[in-house]
Amino acid sequence: AVVSTQSTGITIIIKDGDALRVDKDILTADSSKFRHLIDDLCQKEIDLSEDFSPNIVRLFIGYLESITVDEIERAQFRELHKLAMVFDVQWLVKVCRSWLIREMNLWNSDYDAQVFVFEECLYIFKKWKDCEMISALIVEQRSKESTHHFIMKYMENLASLKTIQLQFLLHLGGSNARVFLEVINRHLNSKNEQSLDENTRCLLLNMNLALCFQKCKDLTYQIFDILSDLKSADDARCMFKLMAASTREALRLRKKNNSPRESRALFDGLVWNELYSRCNTLKEIIEHFVAKSDVVSVYTVIDLLGKVTYFHPPTIEESKKLVESLIGTCDDIPLRRASRGYIDQIISAIKFSDKDSKDQTIHLLGLIKESSKLSSDYDNIQIEGVELAGPSVDGQSTEVSTD
């Protein structure tokens, strides 16, 4: 960098008490942030000692002077890109990201390159909410065989990963349900705990179990066998939620694919969220849901019961009144009946709960199962040819092809 002794020189403080004297024009030519600090705020001294290593600061200032960049090393990339972002040097941001894109070409053969690229793309997203690089990685590498090997190895220590890492790994895996089921199965079999850890729970709740059953029935059953041995109430609720979510997704996709079965809108997101927040007792389900004839599927009612009965155990009279209300609704609008096999799965999961109210909940589900207007022996959940809805990024859901 040019060392200036003139009045236009700006002092850049770096670690270990060292300082660089840099000409103002070099700093401000391509940086709106430096222009603001120097021209608007009249700062003569800028302290970079806390966040950046001295060698990278020198390298950064040298690039500002020459407007050219030598070959970037992996150890330099994060700090150099961060300096370019912090000080809004757009041409250097583009150079850094172009270099990272080239590093993606090494993805197929080098695990170290895979880890580096994935973590740098993820860091850019976390730091600046900028999905450009992680999206490029997902589009280029999703569902490749080398990517599946990377996921298996990267997730060997599942408990150490962050939620955001799990979410983007799910994106990166595409429609390969098996790789994540194998990770979960391996993790569950390696531990002797009596409850689910947060990362396993996160994976299960963000996966499309309809697709898992379709593609990897053997592994999915193995995992549910392990889950059925867990004793905590939270795990029983999680199992209930998994089955309910799987059913809801299958029904949504069935409607999307123009199923000939007649019904009104099954699961409008805003309506569902409103119902879920309002209905905290069986009485409120009847008042806000059944009495207004908004219900078109018994599956929807079962979803709500998972929350309601856990916190407010129903009495026999309340259970009877709810079932009578549902049957009464059928006289005007035939409901989409729930599979008795599905109800049996829910009951099996609840039996493992240590919650005192489980007997009341099982009794209520039994009443629904006994009614021919509310349940059927026919398994009316179609999952062939569905698409996998991936984890949301900033609230936006993505869909990943199952092909």
Image (cartoon, rainbow, N blue to C red):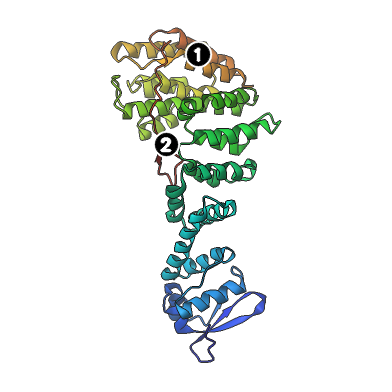
Where is mark 2, residue-wise?
Answer: 389
| Disc 1 residue type (three-letter) | Leu
| Disc 2 residue type (three-letter) | Ala
Image position, residue 125 (x, y; %):
48, 54
**Residue lying furthest right:** 192
> In the rendered image of this protein, does residue 87 appear above or below residue 225?
below
The picture quadrant where one finds residue 356 is top right
**First along the sequence among labels 2 and 1:** 1
Label 1: few (<14), some (14–19) or many (≥20) C-alpha neighbours in 10 Å: many
> In the rendered image of this protein, does residue 396 appear above or below residue 324?
below
Q: Secondary structure at mark 2?
A: strand
Image position, residue 397 (x, y; %):
41, 41
Residue located 34% across and 14% down the image: 329
**Direction from residue 334 to residue 212 in the image, left or right:** right
> In the rendered image of this protein, does residue 159 appear above or below residue 303?
below
For marks 2 and 1, give the one nearer the viewer. 2
Cα–Cα span, label 2 and label 1: 32 Å
Residue 364, numbered circle: 1
